[in-house]
Amino acid sequence: MRYHVFTTPILIGALCGVSACMTLPTDRDVPEIAERYTHRNLNECTSWLTSHVTGYTYCASPAFAVTSVKYDDGIAGGTADELDETMLDLEGLSTNGQVVYDRVCKACHQANGEGMAGIWPPLAGAGEYYGTPQNHARIVVHGLSGEIVVKGETYNGVMPAQGGLLSDYEIAAVLTYVRHSWGNNDGIVTPEDVAAVR
């Protein structure tokens, strides 16, 4: 009797824990890959992609481990503790939301909110899809998988749940930023909206 050993990244991660037996070959990255997957080697992952350029497997959707970063405007971009959670108006939520977007969402949905055709859906002009504040919060808190159609294009990927990684305020802020960027004008999301769907 013959036994076959499957060595796909997901199975390896399931059998021995990603941090225990898998290191990613970041020392051999080409610049294109290094730039696209700047967050790829944090030892935790929910989604893997194989680069057609290098042939190596990269973490596409990790749990984000964020260090404190100071931006030119003086707003800290690290943990929820560094955001001013008393800022609950549109301007305050959006300002803090951009910080969260830049460190959590931009890698996939891009700086312009347009996503990547066929891979990550756009957020710009997608209000009809994400809908009400609580529906939008539900997508971020619980994640999303399976086939969806956004702005007439079909996507069939996985967005990992962020509810365990981000606070109610962080999610409210980033969604408010999204709902008022790139031509969107879809109202604010409050921390109470987020709490209601957890």
Image (cartoon, rainbow, N blue to C red):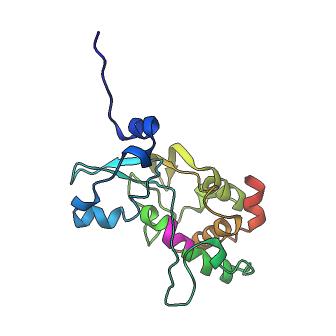
Image location (x, y in percent) of residue 55:
22, 48
Image location (x, y in percent) of residue 84:
69, 81
111 lies left or right of 28: right
Q: Nearer the viewer, residue 115 or 13?
A: 13
| Total number of numbered discs in the rendering | 0
Q: Nearer the viewer, residue 127 or 14?
A: 14
51 lies left or right of 45: left
Q: Is residue 19 magenta?
A: no
Quarter assignment of residue 189: bottom right
Q: Against 17, is 91 above or below?
A: below
Which residue sits at x=43%, y=67%? 110
Which residue sits at x=32%, y=53%? 24
Q: Residue furthest front?
A: 20
Which residue sits at x=26%, y=49%? 56
Image location (x, y in percent) of residue 85:
72, 77
Q: Is residue 137 visible?
A: yes
Q: Nearer the viewer, residue 57 or 96?
A: 57
Q: Residue furthest bottom?
A: 73
Q: Is residue 102 magenta?
A: yes
Q: Is residue 29 visible?
A: no
Q: Residue furthest top?
A: 1
Quarter assignment of residue 116: bottom left
Q: Quadrant of the N terminus?
A: top left
The part of the chain drawn in magenta is 100-104
72 lies left or right of 82: left
Which residue sits at x=47%, y=61%? 122
Q: Main secondary structure of the magenta part?
A: helix
Image location (x, y in percent) of residue 171:
64, 65
Q: Nearer the viewer, residue 133 or 29?
A: 29
